[in-house]
Image: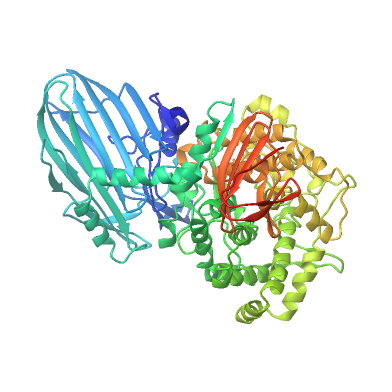
Amino acid sequence: MTKDWQITYQDTPIGVKSYGQESILTLGNGYLGWRGAPVFSCYNDDHYPGLYIAGVFNQTKTKVNNHEVVNEDLVNFPNPQLLKIKINQTELLIPYTKRLAKLNMRHGNLTEEMTFPVKEGHLFLKTTKVCDPVNYHQLALKINLKLDFTADIKVELIIDGDIQNKNVARYRKFNSREFVITKAAKHLLQGETLQSHIKFAIGAKTSSSKVNFKSQYTENSVIDRAEVKLLKNEPLEINRVAAIATSHDATDYLKIVEKSLRQNDFSKIYESSDGHWQQFWKDADIELVTADADIQKLIRLNIFQLHQAASELSNPKFDASVGSRGLTGEGYRGHIFWDELFMVPYYAANAPLAAKAIIKYRIERLAAAQDNAKLQLEHGAMYPWQSGNTGDEQAQFIHLNPMTNTWYPDNSRLQRHISLAIVYDLWSYTQITGKDDLLLNGGLDLLLQTSKFWLEKVEYDGQKYHLSGVMGPDEFHEAYPNTETDGLSDNAYTNLMLAWSLSWLLELKKIMPEYFDKSCKKNNFDRSLVTKAKEVSQNLALFITEDGVIEQYNHYFELKELNLSAYTEKYGDIHRIDRTLKSEGKSSNDYQVDKQADTLMMIYNLGAKVMEKTIAGLGYKLPAEWLLQNRDYYLARTVHGSTVSRPVYASVDVALGDTDSAWKKLKVAMKSDYDDIQGGTTAEGIHMGVMGATLTAIMRDFAGLQWEGDCLTLNPKLPEAWEKLAFTQVYRGVKCHICFHGKELMIKVSRNCEVEIAGKLVFLEADKPYVQKF
């Protein structure tokens, strides 16, 4: 159905709702992101045009309370789409009264139709936007104008270089000027970022069969202008092609832009985009038939935006990863977090070259992670919680609470588990693709250096190893009550993932002994550290009750209980109850209340069996009902302040066989941005992590398709509400098409192989459908 391939808006939104729609309507190709703001808009309370380039950051400085705050931002570049219209010498300034916006995901374009009431009648405006996924420096715009009266009109299409980073309201108090324009000529603006000194060129050409456009240049803009007498109901079509390139990704960036403007027109770019998306969807689509409204199109929105955030055609050619908001807004200043963990497994099975590029971004910043460790008087490599250009720590020391408008310390940088997330990404890529290329080209170095960090950081009490001064994924707990020391001890998630990471390191020692020894020598990782890796992997501390509940961190159970029902009744939305508590003069550090899944996060990463095996390897015994006990205990204390919390708990539910509960959580997560469930955060960009997490949960957890050991396995646990599920993934070179319909499974593989289906080993012939009941 057409509606399942389109995101459609017919309202005339204002404020953060409008900003949020513009985030969702973003077009991109891995290299650039073009926010879906209307062409006539400049930055104001209701609209925010944005054009971002992957990997291009700049630092600014601002004095706050006699303290110099340094911020590194993903740069918002000059706006190439600004349209101004005069009708009979009167500039069109009034708002539109009718609107129809359509993001067509099947064909990769955005159209908007708007009606403007003017003194003499009405102006009808339709725009069509496309980005070129193949020639990824290019974008194009078609404008169709019509009046229901005759008038003289003047049209201007502008590259507006008077741009600052203003997307996020709480950042606007800071210096937001990121670049300077150095030249305006020959349809181009040239400029340079102020601190990172990245040079760029952005150009545009405008054409129409009815009128000739002439260019004018100011200090910060290129204006293409034309005047024409437009008869009643006479259409005027205007085509505009644009291109942008930077010295970050190409030394010949200026030539790239000049060539694009010479050789392209709207139709070429449109055909390139359309052809790419048509081919893409043949294998990328996930078809889910269910009675739930909007679910199918939201699944496709997640696929669409993940493909726009990182592409095999663009990302391998430049140095960048995917930020938590992709290239759709300036939330978290465009920084790269652990959100990669929720995207890499999806990319590895669907776009492995994109996954590889994301991990290479980290490998290229191993030296920066080592420097980061030295700054904290640590050893080895310590990756930053927030990464941007060079890979140094970009997390702030202070944070603004919007409820109190006051600053307080921000210890989020203590989430050292980011290094374990990067190791997990490397493992996921290696496991899913079956390739060692990243391990052999810096990946093993990364694993050794991050392992060295942990092995030097742990402390031994004569029986167990302990890890202090860290935080888990739950950001509501940064320190112990009534202490001035930051960080926590023995966070269960961090300790468990560390035990797993060290076990993988020791496994690689057996698998590739010659290369392992060579890499150990290169990284000064001596035999004593190898021996210690084994000891630590078997003796990290956990704290577990008799009924099997794993303490989130040491002394967590001693914290006070909090009546979440009472807070919900009083405040309504409590997903950021930490801020609410601050406004009451309290601290979330004092209470058993969690922002998101923490203790059970390992189940999302690696499954309940691996978590149970890791716990047993540390010398602890769990009762039979341990997983249910932990799910119920922590779910009752979790407010889902992060969009990725529900997909994690959905994975836990699936492991328990509670697929209906899992599906309820996943549906909410899938609507995170479409319904803006966090009350305005989508305005700052869509949440890439939850998009990857929901798709992974569908294919890996519900359908049960994954690589275990040396075999492709399929263990479906589908909700009753699903009538049909069909998708394609590639594991270790085997393209696998899966279709569940009713109670029947059909599986087709691209080459002869054995697949374990619900515990039974089945030999499948290439391209021959295999069908069985389940």
Q: Residue at x 31, y 27 (%)?
A: 113
* Along the viewing direction, whichever of 633 and 317 lies nearer the viewer: 317
| Residue 168, horizontal then vertical, whole percent | 44, 42
| Residue 711, horizontal then vertical, whole percent | 69, 56
What number of labels is visible?
0
Residue 170, visible in the rendered structure: no
Colour scheme shown: rainbow
Residue 104 in which image quadrant: top left
Q: Residue at x 77, y 51 (%)?
A: 609
Outermost residue toward the right? 546
Going by the image, does 136 lie left or right of 761? Answer: left
Q: Quadrant of the C terminus?
A: top right
Q: Residue at x 53, y 61 (%)?
A: 359
Figure check: 674 above or below 147: below
Going by the image, does 387 lie left or right of 162? Answer: right
Q: Residue at x 72, y 69 (%)?
A: 507
| Residue 127, horizontal then vertical, whole percent | 28, 34
Residue 245, visible in the rendered structure: yes
Residue 652 in which image quadrant: top right
Residue 253 in which image quadrant: bottom left
* Along the viewing direction, whichever of 333 and 772 lies nearer the viewer: 772
| Residue 191, horizontal then vertical, whole percent | 27, 57
Going by the image, does 546 lie left or right of 257? Answer: right
